[in-house]
Image (tube, coloured by chain):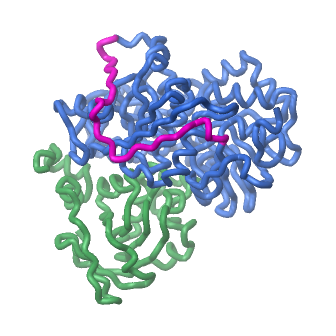
Chain colours: A blue, B green
Amino acid sequence: MTITEKILALHCGEKKVTPGQFILADVDIALGNDITAPLAIEEVEKLNKKNLPHPEKVVLVSDHFTPNKDKESANQCLVVKKFAKKYAINNYFELGCGGIEHALLPEEGFIYPGELIIGADSHTCTYGALGAFATGVGSTDLAFTMMSGKIWLKVPESMKFIYSGKLREWVTGKDLILYAIGDIGVDGAHYRAMEFRGEAISKLSVDGRLTMCNMAIEAGGKSGIVAPDETTLKYIEQFKIPKSKIKVFESDKDAKYVDIKEYDVGEIEPQVAFPHLPSNTKPVSQAGNVNLDQVVIGSCTNGRLEDLRIAAKILKGKKVHPYLRTIIIPATQKIYLQALKEGLMEIFINAGAVVSPPTCGPCIGGHMGVLAKGEKCLATTNRNFVGRMGDKESEVYLASPAVAAASAVKGKIADPAEVM
Amino acid sequence: MNDSKQGKAYKFGDNISTDHIIPGRYYHLRSNLPELAKHVMEDADPKFTQNMKEGDFIVGGRNFGCGSSREHAPLIMKIRGVNAVLAKSFARIFYRNAINIGLPAIECDTDKIKEGDELKLNMGKGIVLNKTSGKEITFKALPPLMQKILNEGGVINYITKYKDLPLKAQ
C-alpha cells in the first residue's frame, strides 16, 4: 500500500484499502472558514441538536473576508462566532488570534503524521506536507462531519513525483510544484494522491513542503503528501503531541502508482504561471516583457516566514517600482510578529511595500488589493483563473516570493538573479 | 429526480473554474443565495444567467468546476433550476459537492452536444437524448453510493432519513 492508502485504512478500521473503494472514515480535524462554514452551520442548525459529538475536532477560522470587508462579510463571521460559542468549539480563531487557516493549523500543532483532515476549503491538501491525509471538501461534507465525526471518501490512486538533484539558487518549493503542474496540466493528477519524494524533497523545509502540497489541488489532485522524515518529526516536536498519536507511515516498496514522474531539479529555473491557468508555466528567463501593476506576497501558499525572509533578502535596501503596488501579507499573527522581530517589516516598508494584516483578501479578489480592468498582478498565491483577483479583464501571474520581490523592484516580471 | 425534464444546452469549454461559476468578489453575498445565483456563470458567459430557463443544462468540457471548494457553485445552479451539469470530466470537489446537494453531475461525451441543442436526461437508463441531433449519448451509471445520495436530494437528506450511509452496498 501507499502511505495514503495506509492512513485511509487506519481511519476506516480496515487492514487494507484499494483505490476506487468507497469508505466511511473517521476524521481527526474538520476545518471551516467564513465562506464555507456558514452553509455547513445552516445544515447543522436545521437538525436542532444540542451538542456536536466531537467539538474538539472542529476548527473554525474566519480568514477570507476578514478584517470584515463590509456588513455582509461581518454577518458571515458573526454566524461562525455564534456557532462556535453555542457548540463549545474552543478551536475558534478570532481576528488577531490566528491568520490564514492553512498556515495557522500546522503552526498551532493541529497537524501531525497519520491524521485524516478534511476542510471546507480546497487548499486543505496543504497538510499532507506533515505526512497526514488531508483533502478539501464542501460545506455539506463539513456539516456531515461535524454531525457524525466521519466523511465518505473514494480511495484515490497515487501518483509519485520524484525530485532528484540539487536546487539552483532562488528555486523553491513553489517552483517545484509549478513545474509539475506545468508538466502534467491542471487535471494531470485528477482525483489522485500526489506523493512527493526524492533528494530535493528530503532537503526541503517544512514551509517549502507546505507550499508544494498546497497546490496539489491545482493539478486536480485529491491530496498531496510527503512521507514523514526527520524534518517533519523535528518540526512537530514543539507541540508535545503524545507519541502514541503520531503514526508515521511510509509507502511499501511494492506500492502501486498509476504514474511516476521524475524531475532533475538542477534543470528547473524559477517558474511563472501565466494567465489564466496554473499549468501555463514558463521559466522566468522566458517570461518576456510583462509590465506589472501589483505584486502580492502572501496567502496560504506563500505567506510563511521563509517566504517573507526570501522577499526581504531581495528587497533590502531597494525600492519597489514607482508605478507598482506591493502588498505583503504575513499569513498569521505569529509570522507577523516574528517578521517584525527580525526586522523584515522595516525592510518592506522602506522599500515602499504595504504590509497587510493576515487575510486571504486579494487572492480571491475579495478585498485588500483587488485589480482594475486590464491590470496585471504577479502573486505568490495559487490560482490565476479569469477574474480571480478582481476585474475579469485583469491578469494574474503566479510565482515564488523571490520572483515576486524581484519583479516588484523591476516593475515587470524579473529573475531574482537580475536584481541581486 | 428530474428524469422527465428537458431543456436547452448551454456549452462551455474546458477547465471552467469555480471563479467562472461564481467569482470570489460576490462572496459577501453568500447569506443571500438567490442574489448570488443571479451571477451564476457570469464570467464564463454573461448571457447565460440572463437567458437560461429552469430545466436547462450546463455542458462543459474537461475538468469542470476546478478550483475552490465553494459549494455555492453547484448550489446556485440548483437554485436556478439547472437540470444537470454534463462534462467530459469534473474536478473532484465540485463533483462531490454536486452529489452531496443533489445536483446531477454526469460524465459523458459532450462533443456530441452543441450550444442550444434540446436535451433530455434519463438518469435510470444512463442516457442523454439529444433531441436536436436525434442521437443518444450514454453514460456510466454513478457508483451506487452516489446514486442513492442523489436520489434523496443530497447527503443530509439521506443521513436524516436512514441514519447511516449505504456503504455496505458497494
Q: Residue at the location (29% across, 29% down)?
A: A252
Give the left or right position of residue B55, taking residue A273 as reference: left
In-front residue for pair A354/A189: A189
Tell me the quadrant of the picture where the N terminus of chain B can be found. Answer: bottom left
Q: Residue at the location (55% across, 38% down)?
A: A264
In-front residue for pair B158/A234: A234
- Location of residue A194 with respect to B123 vertically, above or below: above
Residue B115: image x %, image y %? Answer: 45, 81
Residue B21: image x %, image y %? Answer: 49, 62
- Location of residue B32 with respect to A176 vertically, above or below: below
Give the left or right position of residue B140, taking residue A287 as reference: left
Residue A56: image x %, image y %? Answer: 35, 24
In-front residue for pair A351/A55: A351
Q: How many labels does the image show?
A: 0
Give the left or right position of residue A296, taking residue A86 as reference: right
Q: Residue at the location (44% across, 26% down)?
A: A130
Q: In which quarter of the image is residue A248?
A: top left
In-front residue for pair B137/A94: B137
Based on the picture, tell me whether residue A252 belongs to the magenta stretch.
Answer: yes
The reply to whether residue A40 is visible in this rendering is no
Q: Residue at the location (23% across, 52% down)?
A: B157
Residue A361: image x %, image y %? Answer: 62, 43
Q: In which quarter of the image is residue A122?
A: top left
- Location of residue A413 with respect to A252 vertically, above or below: below
Based on the picture, tell me whether residue A259 belongs to the magenta stretch.
Answer: yes
Residue range in magenta is: A243-270
The reply to whether residue A189 is visible in this rendering is yes
- Location of residue A119 with respect to A251 vertically, above or below: below
Q: In which quarter of the image is residue B123?
A: bottom left
